[in-house]
Image: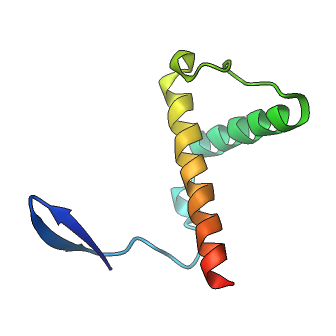
Amino acid sequence: MNNRKVDGAFDVVQSTAITECPTSFISPESKWLLGEYYAATTAHREFGAIKYGANPDKWPAWWFDVVNVLAYAKYEAESIEMTEK
C-alpha cells in the first residue's frame, strides 16, 4: 500500500502492482504506439535520428505522452531490478 497526502491528510491507496502481464488491457492502439516508440528508439540508437525533431515543443502531444510514460516505466522497472539484487 502507498500512503499519499491529499488535502493535508494521508490517505491509503491500494497498490496497482500485479504479478503478470494484463494482456486484456493491451489495445491495438497500444501495440501501435509501442511499435512507433521502439522504431524511433532503434533509429535514434543506430543512426542518431529523432522522430519529430530535437525540440520536444514541436512534438505532437500524443508522442510526448508516449515517450514520457514509457521512459518512466523503464526507469521504474530498472529501479525494481536494482532493489531485487
Question: x, y percentage for residue 19?
Answer: 55, 79
What residue is at 71 percent from the left and 24 percent from the top? 51
User: Which residue appears farthest toward the top when viewing the image?
Assistant: 58
Question: x, y percentage for residue 50?
Answer: 74, 25
Q: Nearer the viewer, residue 20 or 10?
A: 10
User: Which residue appears farthest toward the left when viewing the image?
Assistant: 8
Residue 54 higher or lower than 69, as above or below? above
Question: x, y percentage for residue 31?
Answer: 65, 45
Residue 9 in view (yes/no): yes
Residue 17 higher or lower than 57, as above or below? below
Question: x, y percentage for residue 48?
Answer: 84, 28
Residue 53 shown left or right of residue 27 in the figure? right
Which quadrant is the N terminus positioned in? bottom left
Q: Nearer the viewer, residue 74 or 15?
A: 74
Q: Nearer the viewer, residue 72 or 36?
A: 72
User: Which residue appears farthest toward the right when viewing the image?
Assistant: 46
In which quarter of the view is residue 77 placed? Answer: bottom right
Which quadrant is the C terminus positioned in? bottom right
What residue is at 81 percent from the left and 25 percent from the top? 49
What residue is at 54 percent from the left and 52 percent from the top? 72
What residue is at 66 percent from the left and 74 percent from the top? 81
In which quarter of the view is residue 75 placed? Answer: bottom right
Q: Nearer the viewer, residue 65 or 56?
A: 56
